[in-house]
Amino acid sequence: MVSGNFKKILCGILLWTALSFSKALVDRVVASVNSEPILESDVRMGMLFYEINNRKQLVEKLVEDMLFYQFLVGRGLQVPQELIDEAIQNIARGNKTDVEGIARELAKEGLTLQDLRRFLERELLATQGLGAFLEREIKVSDIEIELEGLKRGSITVVRNLELLVVDKKEESKLKSLFDPKKELSDIARAMGIGLERLRVAKGELVEAVDREVWRSRVGELVIAEDKDHIYIAKVISQEELMDGKSLEELRQELIAKKMERSKAELLERLRKNSFIKVLQ
């Protein structure tokens, strides 16, 4: 099953009317991968999706996608038709039209909705499907994270907290609304002020608040004040940052790097074991 998140592949779509092509252009084969064709219609669709004007570069991209598509199909993966339907609906909404409107614009260029569906099926499987496949195969151990942190330098302990800052002129109103059992967000809403969500290291807050925040335990509510303000803070969690990143952020960064390496290695292997022909 492929993720339903289309933002990565659809955010660069141009208006269908932004490009014009020769109406008489035949949907010929421009390349083949293991005897499976890449058509002129795929190239024209690719110009819209990838915003690549260099034809040679675009055909190369389509060949890579076809290699990944064939690899995943060979392992039993496929894109649900409802996912393709949703992608087409997203395209229509992005261009302020409906599916019939997209079909009419495609027809002007000698293209069909079926051409679009075929293109989307390959695109979704070769991008999001490949990402899901590789991510299942990749593991990052705690030791790897610790070693990466040591390479990057010092470790900073931070606390994630909610902070309500109330002007002392509103003290009586605060007293009437305050209840330690209430969520700070509810108190903030009733006061008509914003609730801050912060990640702070020791010493980064106003002295009175900083002292109470770092004296308290995770989950506790603390109150402090100075000449002008009353501060109410709740410590949500504590974590260690390495190079400004949490352990989970660092884990995801390492996974992304491993995925890029795995993708490059897989592509090289597929190229060596495939018959690719690009036509002029």
Image: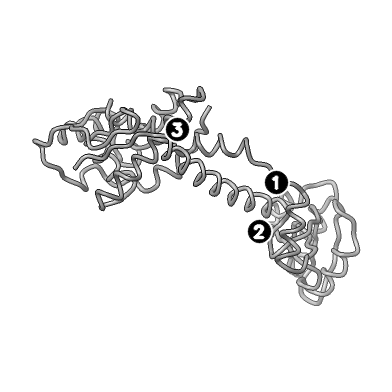
Q: Is residue 273 above or below residue 214?
A: above
Q: Amino acid at mark 1?
A: Val
Mark 3 surroundings within 10 Å by alpha-carbon count, few (fewer than 14), some (14 through 19), many (20 or more): many
Residue 61 location (% of width, % of height) = 35, 44
Q: Nearer the viewer, mark 1 or mark 2?
A: 1
Residue in front for this viewpoint, 197 or 195: 197
- Name the residue located 30 percent from the left edge and 31 percent from the top edge: 116
Classify mark 2: helix, strand or loop. loop
Q: Nearer the viewer, mark 3 or mark 1?
A: 1
Classify mark 3: helix, strand or loop. helix
110 horizontally vs 125: left or right: left
Q: Nearer the viewer, mark 3 or mark 2?
A: 3
For mark 3, what is the residue? 125
Mark 1 surroundings within 10 Å by alpha-carbon count, few (fewer than 14), some (14 through 19), many (20 or more): few
Q: CA distance from mark 3 to mark 1?
A: 24 Å
Q: Are marks 3 and 2 in contact (CB under 8 Å)?
A: no
Residue 134 location (% of width, % of height) = 57, 38
Residue 105 location, quadrant: top left
Q: Amino acid at mark 2?
A: Gly
For mark 1, what is the residue? 140
Classify mark 1: helix, strand or loop. loop
Q: Amino acid at mark 3?
A: Leu
Mark 2 surroundings within 10 Å by alpha-carbon count, few (fewer than 14), some (14 through 19), many (20 or more): some
134 horizontally vs 229: left or right: left
- Quadrant of the snapshot with the C terminus: top left
Residue in front for this viewpoint, 247 or 181: 247
Which mark is on residue 194?
2
Q: Is residue 207 above or below residue 89?
A: below
Q: Earlier in the sequence, mark 1 or mark 2?
A: 1
Q: CA distance from mark 3 to mark 2?
A: 43 Å
Residue 30 location (% of width, % of height) = 23, 37
Q: Earlier in the sequence, mark 3 or mark 2?
A: 3
